[in-house]
């Protein structure tokens, strides 16, 4: 999602609207659980997409992505050097592949949006640098979530995410793993609610403006995209799939998060984000669950 700066807004939702977004978020979170379980050696990305569509519609929800600006599938599935927006189809995934899966669903007009990255076949088939990339990207997402506090400018989350990625790179290199992480240029998180992509931009890197102020009831999708090589990418001929220019692998994590009077509520995490938030000393603020 690429948005201009301009004079963006960060609207707030009522408690009732947040509960509807939570319903959509739970559909997405549960869907990704099922797709993760189905992502085994020999399956096609199209078969994974079918699992997702059947689940989402079976929950009485609607896939957010299908038909969005002409996108032809329920999931975005990006493999190895593909960063985002990969179109599911006949591609077979194999043990050791790094796969990022992005999913969205609509419940009563409200959206949830979430992405995960995984290694097919699990840790026994993983390259150490791929594991480091996935973990660093996920941690940077949680750093951005932790920065989503009342009174801050939403653009400031980019500094939180960048600092986390840079610190992870230094820590891995100090531990003897030769990795260099780069944050993908030109792609960001976004506001979310009645539409999947709304103002404001949620940057993954430090920028000078602070952006609109975070208030109770605000919701955003925070989604760092990080590579093991260049930050530069290009789009394939399908006009959707984004790949790294140098063929390096990429990871993508995303959660939809709300700020409540009590704290943070990660609408697309099955536990509302409680475990990860409390592990980081951050306030958990679910309205219900």
Image (tube, helix red, strand yellow):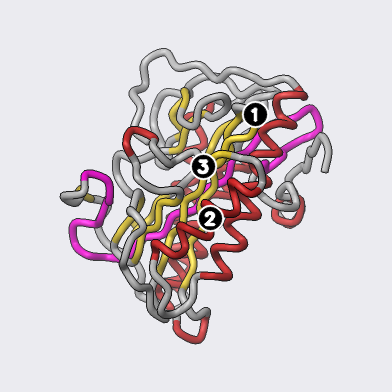
Q: Residue 47, located in which quarter of the rendered image?
A: bottom left
Residue position marked by numbered label 3 in the rendering: 63
Task: Classify residue 191 as left or right of residue 44.
Answer: right
Residue neighbourhood size for the residue with mark 3, other residues' Cα within 10 Å, grouped as few (<14), some (14–19), many (≥20): many
Is-magenta flag for residue 245? Answer: yes
Q: Nearer the viewer, residue 258 or 160?
A: 258
Do the residues under discs 3 and 2 have CB atoms within 8 angstroms?
A: yes
At x 60%, y 42%, the residue is 145
Is-magenta flag for residue 106? Answer: no
Q: Earlier in the sequence, mark 2 or mark 1?
A: 2
Residue neighbourhood size for the residue with mark 1, other residues' Cα within 10 Å, grouped as few (<14), some (14–19), many (≥20): some
Query: Which mark identifies residue 108?
Result: 1
- Residue lying furthest top in this view? 7
Q: Position of residue 282 (x, y in %)?
A: 73, 45
- Residue lying furthest right in this view? 288
Part of the protein shown in magenta: 239-267
């Amino acid at each position: 999602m690429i948005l201009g700066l301009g004079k963006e807004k960060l609207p707030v939702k009522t408690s009732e609207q947040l509960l509807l977004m939570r319903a959509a978020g739970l559909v997405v979170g549960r869907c990704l659980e099922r797709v993760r379980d189905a992502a085994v050696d020999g399956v096609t990305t199209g078969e994974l997409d079918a699992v997702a569509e059947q689940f989402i519609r079976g929950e009485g929800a609607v896939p957010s992505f299908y038909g969005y600006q002409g996108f032809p599938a329920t999931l975005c599935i990006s493999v190895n050097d593909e960063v985002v927006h990969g179109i599911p189809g006949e591609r077979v995934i194999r043990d050791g592949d790094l796969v990022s899966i992005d999913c969205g669903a609509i419940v009563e007009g409200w959206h949830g949006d979430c992405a995960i990255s995984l290694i097919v076949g699990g840790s026994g088939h993983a390259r150490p640098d791929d594991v480091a990339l996935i973990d660093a990207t996920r941690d940077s997402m949680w750093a951005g979530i932790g920065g989503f506090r009342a009174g801050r400018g939403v653009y400031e989350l980019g500094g939180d995410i960048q600092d986390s990625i840079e610190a992870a790179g230094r820590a891995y290199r100090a531990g003897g793993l030769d990795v260099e992480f780069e944050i993908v240029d030109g792609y960001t998180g976004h506001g979310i609610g009645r539409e999947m992509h709304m103002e404001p931009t949620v940057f993954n890197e430090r920028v000078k403006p602070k952006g609109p102020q975070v208030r109770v009831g605000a919701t955003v999708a925070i989604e760092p995209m990080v590579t093991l090589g260049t930050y530069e990418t290009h789009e394939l001929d399908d006009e959707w799939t984004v790949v790294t220019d140098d063929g390096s692998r990429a990871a993508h994590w995303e959660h939809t998060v709300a700020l409540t009077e009590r704290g943070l509520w990660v609408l697309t995490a099955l536990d509302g984000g409680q475990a990860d938030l409390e592990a980081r000393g951050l306030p958990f603020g679910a309205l219900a669950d």
